[in-house]
Image (cartoon, grey):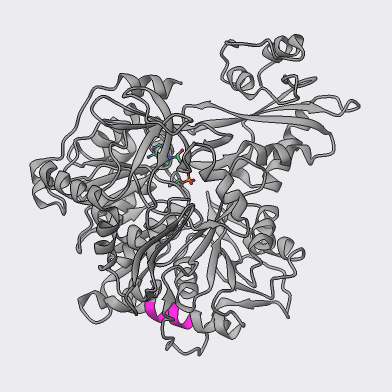
Amino acid sequence: MATIDSLLKEKRRFSPSTEFAQKARISGEAAASKLRALAAKSPEKFWDSAAKDLLWAKPWKKTLVWKPPFAQWFVGGKLNLSANCLDRHLDGPRRNKAAILWEGEPGDRRTLTYQELHYEVCRFANALKSLGVEKGDRVAIYLPQVPEAAVAMLACARIGATHSVVFGGFSSDALRDRILDAQAKVVVTADGGYRKGAVVPLKENVDKAVVQTPCVKKVVVLKRAGCKVDWNDGRDVWWADLVHGRSAVCPAEPLDSEHPLFILYTSGTTGKPKGVVHSTGGYLTQVAWTTKHVFDLREEDTYWCTADVGWVTGHSYVVFGPLANGATTVMYEGAPLYPHPDRFWAIVERLRVSIFYTAPTAIRTFVRFGDEWPKKHDLSSLRLLGTVGEPINPEAWLWYQKVIGGGKCPIVDTWWQTETGAIMISPLPGATQTKPGSATFPLPGIVAEVVDKAGEPVPAEQGGYLVIRKPWPSMLRGIYGDPERFKQQYFSQVAGGTYFTGDGSRIDKDGYLWVLGRIDDVINVAGHRLSTMEVESALVSHPVVAEAAVVGRPDEMKGQGITAFVTLEAKQAPSDRIKDELRAHVVKAIGAIARPDEIRFTDSLPKTRSGKIMRRLLREVAAGQGVKGDTTTLEDFSILAKLQSTDEE
Ligand code: PRX
């Protein structure tokens, strides 16, 4: 609520400096307006011309075939994403340019030029083929943030295998569910990865997961942390042994524009994560265009997006977008505060990073640690800053602008989702006057609106549902194996069959869009999306739990925190030990990101007469506010009173 209140009061405006605007790819408001008008006339034409920036093996016949809710873009065209990210840069000076500048958490470093990355990708692609991986097969990737993660993704793309990257912070149970859903044939992992000075036992997690996944034939293991691992001779193979002596000649397979490039699991409103499917041609078109124009990317930039490849931001803006543009992308393996809160700033200084893209939750954490950490470093190389993942409160925005950007860098607050594949709403940095906390306007070629349940636009300054009216190239093509859920989840909640984002939003009187956050049962913890149902089903799978309700509560640092209301089995007495056990249980089922911040025991949960848990009330209780509004549908009023007096931890 505090964020929303401050967003409502925000009056400050920031224009790009003349110096920035003059050199920008889209220079000045007049140029931006012209582009917007052109794109508005025909979004298809606009995207058609963007697609021509890519390397196609065969041109497309039709720009868009739209049979709601299923879109196909650049139909009949053939291309290969890895050829776009690598091969086409090899016959000019980019060949010896750094593609990836990598730093491990312990401080080890590697640079891969475009030529070297191409070499590694081709060898690994041949290695995958030798394991029996064919076009259309699924490969699960469960790696730390190391260059091999990009190599594995690009190698899959090269041979037409669909990758499913699973974030290294997910537990073995979560990994198992994702492997099974996608029916992956091969898992690519590492012995371990570094996080906050400790080693995350990735191989151990894979071992636990794959005993329950008969679809997995081979596990490829990268030696990263040097920790001891168990070995299954018939199944496991070291990455180094697999590529040793392998040919680096591997022609990129021309693939249909609609060929599924990757599946990425994300949380929805039910307990089961959704496998969001992305295409090749449409996805790369929008990812490449947005990387170039939203970040105003140039040949000489050193570009750093701090996301992990396990999330969509890592796919689109650490790996594919920058490489498709022939840029130098920075990758850092570890935690932002390790060993000290200036780790990011030390990297910016050493590499002279010019474009820096991170999450509001990280910015708020840096605010808390104080200005002295960034002030230790020369950050003058920065020329553009970006944020993504959740609404940014104006205070954090202003700190970012002043302390990190030295008052001279435009900030692009980029709104998008796993499902949208690429940035949808964002300032154009050389043109748009920004308001701290607002993602400003839909990009050219994107038709976003704020509507009511009936699909009618709501008046200015009024809250409503954020919808995308027209198909866009990088939109998800479906939920893996579940077309019904795809329709139900995205195209049935707002009348008129328009795509509903799950976000609430408002457009102010100047036309600026303010995203207010999720309005479904999805919560956003430190920029990571979680379903309250997912955490609930983890809790109720514990033998002592009779019932659980999970809600988000405001958290100054993480945006939202997790409060779980738990009813224990009658014979089980509440205790701190049980709380700890339940927390550990959730971590095992999902991962550390889902650990409840607060567990509150209750005799029973407040429900409507039809048995629905009254989450709104629980949210208010969790937020520490008095319960407002209508409570007459409560089955037992005493429960609510009791809940409110439950001791906080
Ligand atoms: O609620 C919105 C929020 O993050 C959700 C998407 O989460 P995910 O699929 O994990 O992708 C995150 C990275 C693209 C959205 O529905 N969100 C994302 N960016 C913003 C945002 N909320 C406000 N402002 C943003 N810039």
Q: Quadrant of the C terminus?
A: top right
Q: Where does residue 12 sit, x and y in percent of width and height?
A: 22, 25
Location of residue 539 (image quadrant)? top right
Give the side of residue 333 with respect to residue 535, left or right. left
Q: Is residue 603 above or below residue 277?
A: above
Answer with the quadrant where ligand 1 appears in the image. Answer: top left
Q: Is residue 419 above or below residue 186?
A: above
In magenta segment, residue 120:
yes
Q: Is residue 214 above or below residue 120?
A: above
Q: Where does residue 63 sit, x and y in percent of width and height?
A: 33, 64
Location of residue 553 (image quadrant)? top right
**Residue beneath the point at 23% across and 47% down:** 384
Task: Give the main secondary structure, helix, strand or loop, of the magenta stretch.
Answer: helix
Residue at the extreme right of the image, as rendered: 571
Location of residue 219 (image quadrant)? bottom right
In magenta segment, residue 290:
no
Q: Nearer the viewer, residue 205 or 414?
A: 414
Give the side of residue 389 with respect to residue 130, left or right. left
Q: Is residue 74 above or below residue 339?
A: below
How many dots with numbers? 0
**Residue beneath the point at 74% across and 31% down:** 548
Q: Where does residue 407 sit, x and y in percent of width and height?
A: 19, 36
Magenta part of the chain: 118-123
Q: Nearer the viewer, residue 7 or 402?
A: 7
Residue 251 seen in the figure: yes
Residue 378 seen in the figure: no
**Residue beneath the point at 64% across and 58% down:** 178
**Residue beneath the point at 34% across and 71% down:** 85
